[in-house]
Image: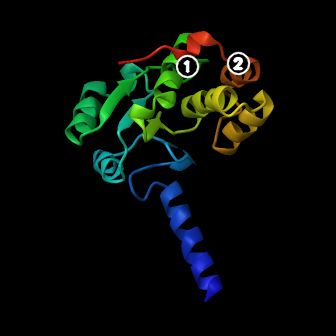
Amino acid sequence: MIRAVVVAVLGAAAALAQGSDGLPNFKVVNDHILRGGQPTDEAFQKLAERGVKTVVDLRWTGEHDISHEKQIVETDGMRFVSVPMHGLSAPTQEQVSKVLSVLEDSNSWPVFIHCRRGSDRTGTVLACYRIAHDHWQNQKALEEAKTYGLSSFERAMRSFIQHFQPGPEALFSVR
């Protein structure tokens, strides 16, 4: 009986991680932050049904139709925040600060944050969140990012995490 329950739970978690709900690389960071790759239009509705209030999109403008995603998210009753980041370079301090201000704003919770795969840009920003909010050591935050798929080719992002130091500029608000 217990074995059957464990197998069922592991199977459900594996299916969710593979994106069976239209949420690739979906993970729960804590009680108010969820992460993943690019959701399908239907998955945005599922996020809204789960109580998500804010969606943070880290994809660059040329990668997809941001206005379409904004419309879908807002139609589903959630707030849409776009902080476009290149997929092959480190974010700027300003970009990270904008995202951290949303993640720290209890009026935005729960927040779903994503990029295309939910690994590199999302992993980098959430590693910075772990350092700033959870007071993790940079190396521990980097290890978690690697666990969730941060590519070994993303040297600039890895370096950004290793050298990230939160400061007061990380606390300005995005509206």
Where residue 106 sits: x, y (%)? 45, 33
Q: In terms of depth relative to the viewer, which is nearer, 136 or 17?
A: 136
When asked about the image quadrant of residue 96, the answer is: top right
Dot label at residue 131: none
Query: Disc 2 vs disc 1: Cβ atoms closer than 8 Å?
Result: yes
Pointer 1 residue: 96
The relative height of residue 48 versus residue 106 in the rendered view (above or below) is below
In this view, which residue lies farthest toward the front? Answer: 106
- Measure the C-alpha gap from mark 2 to mark 1: 10 Å
Where disc 1 sits, the SS reads helix
Residue located 59% across and 84% down the image: 4
Whichever of labels 2 and 1 marks the residue nearer the N terminus, that label is 1
User: Which image quadrant: the N terminus?
Assistant: bottom right
Where disc 2 sits, the SS reads loop
Where residue 71 sits: x, y (%)? 22, 32
Pointer 2 residue: 164
User: Which image quadrant: the C terminus?
Assistant: top left
Residue located 62% across and 76% down the image: 6
Residue type, label 2: Phe
Q: Residues within 10 Å of mark 2 (few under 14, many from 20)?
A: some
* Relative side of 103 to 150, left or right: left
The relative height of residue 69 versus residue 33 in the rendered view (above or below) is above
Q: Residues within 10 Å of mark 1 (few under 14, many from 20)?
A: many
Where residue 110 sits: x, y (%)? 43, 42
Looking at the image, can residue 92 be seen? no
Looking at the image, can residue 162 be seen? yes
When asked about the image quadrant of residue 152, the answer is: top right
Where residue 82 sits: x, y (%)? 38, 23
How many numbered discs, if any?
A: 2
